[in-house]
Image (cartoon, rainbow, N blue to C red):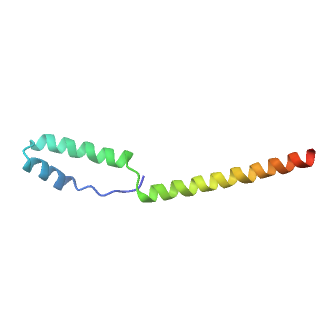
Amino acid sequence: MGATSFDTHTFVKRLTEAGMPEAQAEVLADSQTKLIDEKLATKQDLKELELRLTIRLGSMVVIAIGVVATLVKLL
């Protein structure tokens, strides 16, 4: 996955200002950072996936046309 920006310091600061204990806010910020890094897809990730799928679909179409052309010659 690509790099994302998540300001943990601001996140912890806002949580502590809202009344959450600092230790708990830091654990939550760490968990959020891991979640974002491991599970969130960026626009670049989606573009790369789209390219791979386009290439794969194109390959499948070419193979299918080859199979149909071969079957037509055999019949």
In this rendering, position of residue 63 left or right of residue 12: right
Looking at the image, how many numbered discs can be counted on the residues? 0
Residue 23 x/y as whole percent:
13, 41
Residue 43 x/y as whole percent:
42, 59
In this rendering, position of residue 54 left or right of residue 43: right
The answer to which quarter of the image holds residue 7 is bottom left
In this rendering, position of residue 25 left or right of residue 46: left
Residue found at x 86% / y 48%: 70
In this rendering, position of residue 49 left or right of residue 4: right
Residue found at x 27% / y 45%: 32
- Compared to residue 39, the image places residue 50 above or below, namely below
Q: Nearer the viewer, residue 71 or 37?
A: 71
Q: Quadrant of the C terminus?
A: top right
Residue 58 x/y as whole percent:
67, 55
Residue found at x 81% / y 47%: 67
Residue found at x 21% / y 52%: 8
